[in-house]
Image (cartoon, rainbow, N blue to C red):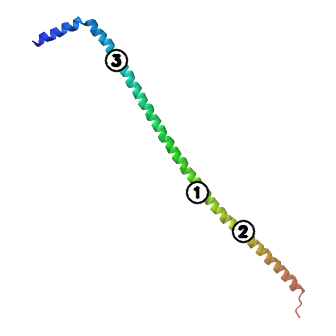
Amino acid sequence: MARQKQRAMGSRNRGAGTESGGRVVRDRAVVKQDERLRVQMQEQAINEAIVREREDEIREIHQNVTKVNEIFKDLAEIVNDQQEDINTVEAMIEKSHAHARSGLDQVEKANEHQQGCVVS
């Protein structure tokens, strides 16, 4: 009985040969279209992954630039603080120089006065 069903199915398939051939062509076209669609979807997924990766890299670069900016601000503040110290030292040196000059003038005057003095 099973063989009779197979024979009957076989004869039906043989009788519809042109119909089956048309299906095969349509099936192949559908398979090709599905393959193209799958490839397009893969390409789109790859492009989206690349875009996400670039966005992440841009964010990382922005964070690094922000850090460098903060470092330069800190450095500028340190230099400014040091400049104040340098200005203070410079002012003290100028005062010391003025005091030394004044002291030298007083020593020279004292020397002149002592030369005119005669001890008897």
Q: Quadrant of residue 89?
A: bottom right
Q: Quadrant of residue 91?
A: bottom right
The disc, 3 or 2, on the residue closer to the chain's N-terminal end is 3
Q: Secondary structure at mark 2?
A: helix
Q: Nearer the viewer, residue 83 or 115?
A: 83
The residue type indicated by label 3 comes to Val
Q: Nearer the viewer, residue 9 or 87?
A: 9
Q: Is residue 95 left or right of residue 52?
A: right
Q: Residue at x 36, y 18 (%)?
A: 32
* Quarter of the image with the C terminus in it: bottom right
CA neighbours of label 2 inside 10 A, class few (<14), some (14 to 19), many (20+): few
User: What residue does disc 2 label?
Assistant: 91
Q: Nearer the viewer, residue 41 or 3?
A: 41
Q: Position of residue 5 (x, y in %)?
A: 14, 11
Circle number at residue 18:
none
User: What residue does disc 1 label?
Assistant: 74
The residue type indicated by label 2 comes to Ala
Q: Residue at x 31, y 9 (%)?
A: 22
User: What residue does disc 3 label?
Assistant: 30
Q: Residue furthest left?
A: 1
CA neighbours of label 1 inside 10 A, class few (<14), some (14 to 19), many (20+): few
The disc, 1 or 3, on the residue closer to the chain's N-terminal end is 3
The disc, 2 or 1, on the residue closer to the chain's N-terminal end is 1
Q: Position of residue 3 (x, y in %)?
A: 12, 11
Q: Is residue 104 left or right of residue 34?
A: right
Q: Nearer the viewer, residue 90 or 77?
A: 77
Could you tell me how far apart the alpha carbons at marks 2 and 1 are, in whole angstroms? 26 Å
